Amino acid sequence: MSTGTPTSTSGGSDPAHAAPGTTVLGADDIARALTRIAHEVVERNKGVDDVVLLGIPTRGLPLARRLAQRLEQVENVPAADLVGSLDVTMHRDDLAHQPTRTIGETYVPGDGIDGRVVVLVDDVLYSGRTIRAALDAISDLGRPRAVQLAVLVDRGHRELPIRADYVGKNLPTASAERVRVLLSETDGEDRVVIEGGVR
Amino acid sequence: MTTYLLTGARPLGGDPTDMLIADGVVAAMGADARRGGADARTGGADVVVDAAGLVLLPGLVDLHTHLREPGREDAETVESGTRAAALGGFTAVHAMANTTPTQDTAGVVEQVWRLGRDAGWCDVHPVGAVTVGLAGERLAELSAMARSAAAVRVFSDDGKCVHDPVVMRRALEYVKAFDGVVAQHAQEPRLTEGAQMHEGVISAELGLTGWPAVAEEAIVARDVLLAEHVGSRLHVLHLSTAGSVEIVRWAKARGIDVTAEVTPHHLMLTDDLVRGYDPRFKVNPPLRTAADVEAVREGLADGTIDTVGTDHAPHAREDKDCEWGAAAFGMTGLETALSVVQATMVDTGRLTWADVARVMSTAPARIGRVAGHGRPVAVGEPANLTLVDPAARRVVVPEEQATASVNSPFAGRELPGRVVATFLRGRATVLDGAPVERGVHV
Amino acid sequence: MRHLLSAADLDLTEAVRVLDTAAQMAATQAREIKKLPTLRGRTVVNLFFEDSTRTRISFETAAKRLSADVINFSAKGSSVSKGESLKDTALTLQAMGADAVVIRHPASGAPHTLAHGGWTRGAVVNAGDGMHQHPTQALLDAYTLRRHLVGDGGRADATGRDLAGVHVAIVGDVLHSRVARSNVQLLRTLGARVTLVAPPTLVPVGVHAWPAEVSYDLDEVLATGPDAVMMLRVQRERMSSAGGGFFPSPLEYSRGYGLDARRLAVLPDHAVVLHPGPMNRGLEISADAADSPRAVIVEQVANGVAVRMAVLYLLLAGGEPARGRDDAAGTPAAEGQERTEMRTDETRTHA
């Protein structure tokens, strides 16, 4: 759940009284989770020859890059050849309910995604609507052999029949709570925080 | 006839005095005003008007009104327009010639004159067209109009310029026979083809075709020289530019028999109002710059400009409720003119109330050769009078005005002053700021 | 951004945002599948009171690529051409549920009146009004300039960049040109320096208030090495007495202000030539210049679609921020970059 800068995302319907966040994953936890996911990707796909990691901006993209670095170490494939970016803004179904969003960049490494295995990477899996938009966006780019999903946190509350293939951490939450993933690339530190709600 | 006692009124803004109005004239003033009867309060008058603090002016005279009838009764009628005039403090208006049919024959001017007489709100003096159909080509039968029941003395193609120098020369000469005056709408037509607003910084920004100041000034300059050459008198309508003021000032210094008019809107509004493309601000000549506004105020203050004429130009809603380019030129003004003059000239210290009487009554009556109006506020004079409350303030709401149209550029503005009463030959047309229907006894 | 009526409506941040969004739109147009579902269910009306097939097609393509429904309403030639008809037409379109009205009108200010007359609730996009404004043309020109002069022809990332330091000469009929007015404002906002070049008859009185220099000598300006030369269309009828007699003959105009091979050769290597089209070959631009590798005129057309997609996206895609219970993105502090980073479904049902 990429939620922008801290100032604009303090959780709760009344930000002034938001509970201080509870850290549920530290930097080491995140690193271990990503390493495990990287190995699972290799194992499941019997290598990474056909794999493309598409990160969903904003925070899915650095996570995809980190996974690619790990795959590079394991499989000796240049990380840059593995990672792309998939902006899903223009495929969202809730545009009319939100202030106008800036459109992020979409790029695909190498020769596109036709016949390859696309691993979508995002920070938090929640309702599943982002992933639905992502699946639509992918179909505009080409026809992959398979699409898999890797997320750092799965917090439940799915609204669509979507599940993750690789999960860093399952995090049972109340819907009133807010899960924030902070990454050093975008936020200056690695940490996963739960805010709001009554714990 | 109802007699009126005005108590504590200030003639031309001077010391308070009482005035008795009876038999259509100012019957008495001062202590004499109450000697008509035993009752000390009423002095025998039928109606007492408490005029304490109010300024008493000779009834205002407009040399420049568009009453639209015949032809555009959807925008204004003689009845609605003259009612608006009375509410604005006017006792006489000149109805411009650009009606349909054009006021270019004795028959049409007499029709308008009769409509005015029948309405009874103020005297209506039709303006005769200078040229047939305002086409600028052939002189209309000016003499016939002058000798008609309407007794036309002011001739104008207003809305269009008598641009052909020969036609203008002939008109200036011809009207001398009956002491007429040509009132020129100074607009060089070739320099203003497609013109939409004042040509300058704002027109360049808005992409609207410009109406350059020189198009007015060139005609004013030509006409004062023509008037000098043929020894005629000339009246310049709605002077709007600093250059025009300069030319008229020069002409007067030279002894040329020229008089000039400024409109209330050119005394107050500037071309930057066009930025919102609101057609209420579309007028001809266009709103000019702040420097021009200052120049016409100065001209009015120093006597270069003789009169304030409203150029009251009502338009049907559909002619203003559209994009700028398609909108008609013109603004209503009868019911706001005196307030605008107060705001721009009196409250700024540039004119006294006596000066206001000069520029809005005496001078226009003299130029139009209107008998019985623009007279001194004195015993024995026709009781054409206006009572103004200079301390009042009001917000202009066009829908509440008597004019049939709502195209007031002052809508929503707060203006000073309020006409409390208007008397036409001793009969109240307005009392307590409300129109008085004829035959209603107050 | 509620409407796009004038290039002056955009501040630097907004202008750069349109260009950045256009860049992403352009990227999607390089794909095999160019259509995006973004504006599904939205209705865009092209309301053209003046013939302009190019502009209409560009807007129509942009709207369709974003899956909006498009209604083309050509008022030219029908009895619908007087003032009251704009109001009636607008009321009709409102009744039909137009989310956006793209309007081309011969009267300056007509889009402004449409947007503020209370006749329509939809967004109004000015597709050219009289001699006033043509903001999407200026945006596509700026996009094209940025791509070449800042982004090295697409080889470098120009995202987030403005046009600071760029010198653009705009040559031709400035007086009657809405393209010039929009470009002067937008290029200035983006930090570029603008020199207007025209015969004195085709420069408006009041131009001294514009943020641009004025020259009557094209050769002198070209010698200063501008980064771009934007040629404006000149209508031949302007030379006739009835048309205003603005210049004596086409030949005299071309000699003074036409871009030909000789003048083209004076330009620096990196400089580009723009023209909003349609061109009068042989009048303001010679065939050599129009077809030279420096001319980016055809690319302007393609960029026009991307820029108009961006404008429609920015005007139509967002909704009222739903306050309160289920929308963290609706926090008042969120704006610009910040709010636009908040993109997930998760936030919607969240806090």
Image: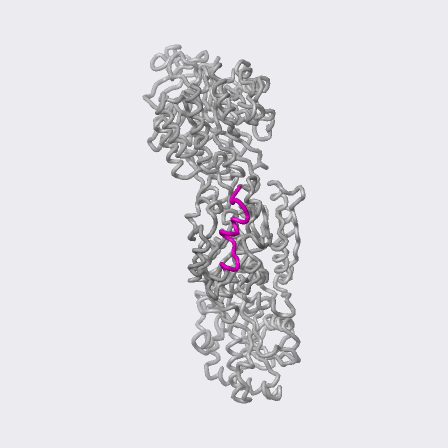
> Compared with residue C143, is residue B413 higher up or lower down, i.e. above or below?
above
Q: In this orientation, does residue B392 appear?
A: no
Q: Percent x, y for residue A156?
A: 58, 75
Location of residue C222 (image quadrant)? bottom left
Q: Which residues are magenta?
A: C245-263
Could you say which is closer to the camera, residue C182 or residue B88? C182
Location of residue B149 (image quadrant)? top right
Q: Residue at 36% across / 14% down in the picture?
A: B29
Look at the image and say whether residue B317 sits in the magenta stretch.
no
Location of residue C78 (image quadrant)? top right
Could you say which is closer to the camera, residue B139 or residue A101? B139
Q: What's the image's color scheme?
A: one colour
Could you say which is closer to the camera, residue C241 or residue C178? C241
Please identify the residue farthest to the right as the structure is shown: C78
> Compared with residue A184, is residue B167 higher up or lower down, i.e. above or below?
above
> Compared with residue B121, is residue C268 higher up or lower down, i.e. above or below?
below
Q: Percent x, y for residue B102?
A: 58, 24
Q: In this orientation, does residue C32 appear?
A: yes
Q: Residue at 53% across / 84% down in the picture?
A: A78
Q: Is C3 left or right of B217, judged from the image as shown? A: right
Q: Is B355 left or right of C123, judged from the image as shown? A: left
Q: How many marks?
A: 0
Could you say which is closer to the camera, residue C248 or residue B390? C248
Q: Is B210 left or right of C74, judged from the image as shown? A: left
Q: Percent x, y for residue A69?
A: 51, 84
Q: Percent x, y for residue C173?
A: 51, 49
> Compared with residue C70, is residue C24 higher up or lower down, i.e. above or below?
below
